[in-house]
Image: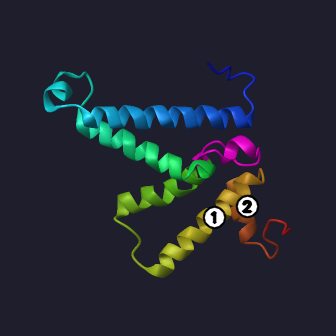
Amino acid sequence: MYDFTTLSPQDFEHFVRDLLEAAQGYAVDRIKMTAQERAAAPSRGALSAFKHRALARRIHTRIEDYLRFASNPIVPFDNNPAEREVRMAKLRQKISAGMRTLTGAEQFAALRSYIATTLKHDLRTLDALTMLTTPNPWLPETT
């Protein structure tokens, strides 16, 4: 059994690999069942086993990508910030059925990018947009 409070990145990787092996074994066992056994089983049947097996195979082939956050503290655990950045564009696409012109889409993307950058620099959005109309607009420092 694993103690998650003191788990090292290497131990976490071993835990995930053990979990994958168990998932692949479960999926193989489910596929080998007869139709009668599958019908009597509490899960959703062979389709469920195929999905489990496909997920386990995908994680197994890209294990380094999935576990990068465990060995590199700079990498976030999830991609919520990236999904939040895309949300407004997807919402606008859903409401207005997309952008009417390429120029309009580029301007929308530039404005959303500017607003997201100002928020990351703890600047109020209205202040930053107001500064855009002045001769010296706010621009982030380059590295």
Going by the numbered disc 1, the residue's amino acid type is Ser
Question: Mark 1 = which residue?
Answer: 113
* Residue 1 spot, x, y in % from top left: 61, 18
**SS for callout 2:** helix
Residue 4 pos. (x, y %)? 67, 23
> Does the residue at mark 2 contact the one at mark 1 (Cβ under 8 Å)?
no
Q: Which mark is residue 128?
A: 2
Q: Quadrant of the C terminus?
A: bottom right
Q: Residues within 10 Å of mark 2 (few under 14, many from 20)?
A: some
**Residue at the image position 69 percent from the left and 32 percent from the top:** 11
Q: Quadrant of residue 96?
A: bottom left
> Is residue 70 covered in magenta?
yes
Q: Residue 6, which numbered label? A: none
Q: Which one is in front, 123 or 83?
A: 83
Coordinates of residue 87 in the picture (x, y in percent): 50, 53
- Residue at the limit of the structure toward the left, as seen here: 36
Q: Earlier in the sequence, mark 2 or mark 1?
A: 1
Determine the residue positioned at 72% across, 21% down: 5
Q: Picture quarter containing residue 111?
A: bottom right
Report whether 31 appears left or right of 91. Answer: left
* Measured Cα–Cα span from mark 2 to mark 1: 12 Å
Identified by mark 2, the residue type is: Ala
First to last magenta residue range: 66-80
Relative to residue 22, is residue 79 drawn left or right? Answer: right
The spot of residue 23 in percent (x, y) is 43, 34
